[in-house]
Amino acid sequence: MSGNKENLLGFDISTLPQEELIESALSQIGENKNVHIVTINPEIMEMAAKNDDLSDIIKSAEIIIPDGIGIKIGFKIKGIDIQRTAGIEFAYKLLEKAQEKNLPVALIGAKNDVLELTSANLKKKMPNLNIVYQRDGYFGEADEEGILENIIALKPSVVLVALGAPKQEIFISKLKNCCKGTIFVGVGGSFDVWSGRTRRAPVIFQKLGLEWFYRTVTQPSRLKRIFPTLPLFLFRVIIDEGKK
């Protein structure tokens, strides 16, 4: 694929550097467009392979960034070398830009105490960050209308949703239909890290793309999520490449 995207198992994934991705997103909301940013990894891609609605939501996203070493390995199998963009770093840089430009921000997801700590810690590091709305992730469909109404009324330019996949992508698709000029990012467990409740992998693991390994060692319950998901994902990439 030409341009700034490469296709992997039917998904057009951006190859732009992080700074250019953020500038592209900010430029689009400046034109009153919505921008859904999906931080994709093998686990989400395997979910999408079994869920057509999720697959359609991801494919309709304006930007899909390669989060996770598995995506980088998948492209390696195709003979393409891409730079991984960690979703948590991308979201943090986006918030820094939001502070710089005084853009209103909404935070949705996690437990209430985690959300409160996240908000407080972000404000310590970014004193001028304009957080106009926050809501924990413990809500059902009956509560969604009220949340949508708040987002419509407050008009945040950046909305971070930490509900985990696929729930966050599905919820963002509902928000996206009600808003204009907004960047939406599903950020998974980022609030847990920003709150201080969960420790991020040491820098050496981050640089080697082995954060998943560190999290698996420190949280063995994650093992069943990674295996057989990662091997199955890589097997599908190999099979797909063999068809060409």
Image (cartoon, rainbow, N blue to C red):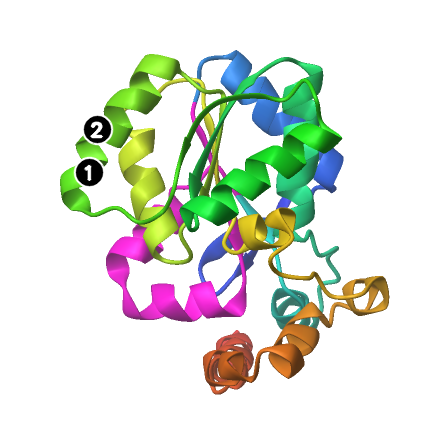
Q: In the figure, residue 214 lies in which quadrant?
A: bottom right
The answer to if 85 sits in the magenta stretch is no
Q: Few, some or many C-alpha atoms within 10 Å of disc 1 (few <14, some 14-19, many ≥20)?
A: few
Percent from the top left, x then y, of residue 167? 33, 54
Q: Amino acid at mark 1?
A: Asp
Q: Using the image as rendered, state which of residue 218 and residue 242 is in the foreground.
A: 218
Residue that label 2 marks: 146
From this view, report whether residue 211 is shown above or below residue 231. above
From this view, report whether residue 98 is shown above or below residue 160. above
Side (left or right) of 149 relative to 213: left
- Could you say which disc has been placed on residue 143 in the image? 1
Q: Secondary structure at mark 2?
A: helix
At x 65% / y 29%, what residue is drawn? Answer: 123
Q: How many marks?
A: 2
Q: Amino acid at mark 2?
A: Gly
Percent from the top left, x then y, of residue 169? 37, 48
Percent from the top left, x then y, of residue 94? 64, 32
Q: State yes or no: discs 2 and 1 in contact (Cβ < 8 Å).
A: yes
At x 57% / y 42%, what residue is drawn? Answer: 117
Q: Using the image as rendered, state which of residue 26 and residue 193 is in the foreground.
A: 193
- Could you say which disc has been placed on residue 168 in the image? none
Q: Which residues are magenta?
A: 34-63
